[in-house]
Amino acid sequence: MPQGAGGAGAPRHVAIIMDGNGRWARERGWPRLVGHRRGAERVKQVVRACPDMGVEWLTIYAFSTENWRRSREEVVGLMGLFARYIRKEADELSKEGVRMRFIGDRSQLDRRLRDLMTGIEHRTAANTRLNLTVAINYGGRDEIVRAARRLAREVAAGRLAPDEIDFAALAAGLDTVGQPDPDLVIRTSGELRSSNFLPWQAAYSEYEFTPTLWPDFSPEELQQILARFAARERRFGGAKTR
């Protein structure tokens, strides 16, 4: 929960809705997967830049529960891209002190991809320079429903009384347990919606929307956004102080 108000300063945790890969490719007459591959390259650049900007936690929205509605070709291509990224970047992420974790419902994912995800989580578990969380098959409403079901099972088993259910009890069942809430959520591509991304965790987050398509989003633009964030006053429901 928020602890105070005043000048925002540097955000400890930045979350990004990486939107616009398909549009970027379409504008150039290329297949959508080309845009996704270029977007994956952009992820590498942003991940490497974050620690020097004071960002300790970075959470990126890679694949939502609604993205299964896309064409089979695109979904299969994305899953293959995720697997290649993990294999290719495992050594570099580990060397650079990045801890990688995943949130979302893994039950629908291919077993080989799940194994790769678990493997890199274990391999990078001791790293502390940057905490990178990737949301795959993630939906905020789905996450809250799964947490509520866990609480319901605890109540049904007699291990938890209904009156004992509070914010902390529900949060303990979310995929992000143990992680700080995002200070800042960025969405690229000019769309002005949160798309079911971290609705519980981002209840008091600041938002920044940029028209830049994700494959064109640069560390320099991220730095500009962080500077604007630092000038904001975060009140968390309190009165304006300046």
Image (tube, rainbow, N blue to C red):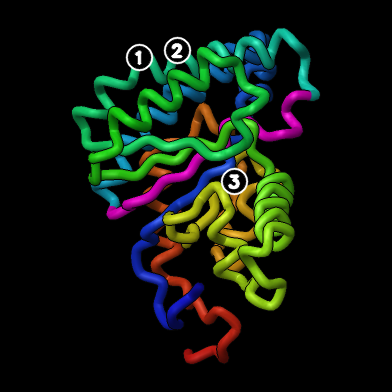
Secondary structure of the residue carrying tag 1 is helix
Q: Which mark is residue 88?
A: 1
Q: Residue at x 64, y 67 (%)?
A: 160
Q: Which mark is residue 84?
A: 2
Asked whether the beta carbons under mark 2 and mark 3 sit within 8 Å of each other, the answer is no
Give the camera-side residue of 14 and 148. Answer: 148
Residues in magenta, as a range: 54-68
Nearer mark to the viewer, of 2 and 3: 2
Q: Residue at x 49, y 58 (%)?
A: 182
Q: Residues within 10 Å of mark 3 (few under 14, many from 20)?
A: many
Instruction: Locate residue 193, reporting x and y percent.
Output: 72, 50
Instruction: Locate residue 186, reporting x and y percent.
Output: 54, 49
Asked whether the beta carbons under mark 2 and mark 1 sit within 8 Å of each other, the answer is yes
Give residue 127's quadrant in the image.
top left
Mark 1 or mark 3, which is nearer the start of the sequence? 1
Name the amino acid, label 1. Lys
Secondary structure of the residue carrying tag 3 is strand
Q: Residue at x 30, y 40 (%)?
A: 49
Q: Which residue is mark 3?
A: 187
Cα gap from disc 2 to disc 1, whole angstroms: 6 Å
